[in-house]
Image (cartoon, rainbow, N blue to C red):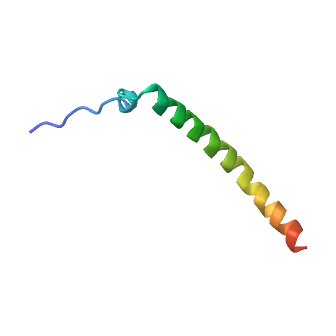
């Protein structure tokens, strides 16, 4: 019983369509924006509370 070799990470997207690519791209951009704005919520809440 031998172990199978790992497939490259790129093979995950082997069967993606153009729509899948667009959705993934929008998701990545949205996640980056949300991650960048998350620390600003602390500043906003601090100013709201006083």
The residue at the point 77 percent across, 60 percent down is: 41
Q: Position of residue 19 (x, y in %)?
A: 48, 30
Tell me which residue sits at (18%, 37%) in the image: 3
Please tell me in which quadrant of the rendered image residue 47 appears.
bottom right
Outermost residue, right side? 50
Q: Is residue 6 left or right of residue 21?
A: left
Counting labels gives: 0
Residue 8 spot, x, y in % from top left = 35, 29
Instruction: Kindly give the residue lying farthest to the front in the view shown.
Output: 19
Residue 12 against residue 32 in the figure, above or below: above
Quick check: 1 above or below 43? above
- Name the outermost residue toward the bottom: 49
* 30 with respect to 1 (left or right): right
Nearest to the observer: residue 17 or residue 48: 17
Residue 6 in the figure: left or right of residue 4: right
Instruction: Write down the quadrant of residue 39 in the picture.
Output: bottom right
* Residue 17: % across, % down: 42, 27
15 vs 45, nearest the viewer: 15
Location of the C terminus (image quadrant) = bottom right
Coordinates of residue 26 in the picture (x, y in percent):
59, 37
Indicate the quadrant containing the N terminus: top left, top right, bottom left or bottom right: top left
Residue at image point 71% right, 55% down: 38
> Where, by quadrant of the figure, is residue 45 drawn?
bottom right
In the foreground, 40 or 20: 20
């Amino acid at each position: 019983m031998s172990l199978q070799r790992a497939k490259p990470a790129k093979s995950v997207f082997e069967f993606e369509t153009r729509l899948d690519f667009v959705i993934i791209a929008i998701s990545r951009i949205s996640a980056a924006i949300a991650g960048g704005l998350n620390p600003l919520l602390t500043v906003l809440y601090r100013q709201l509370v006083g």
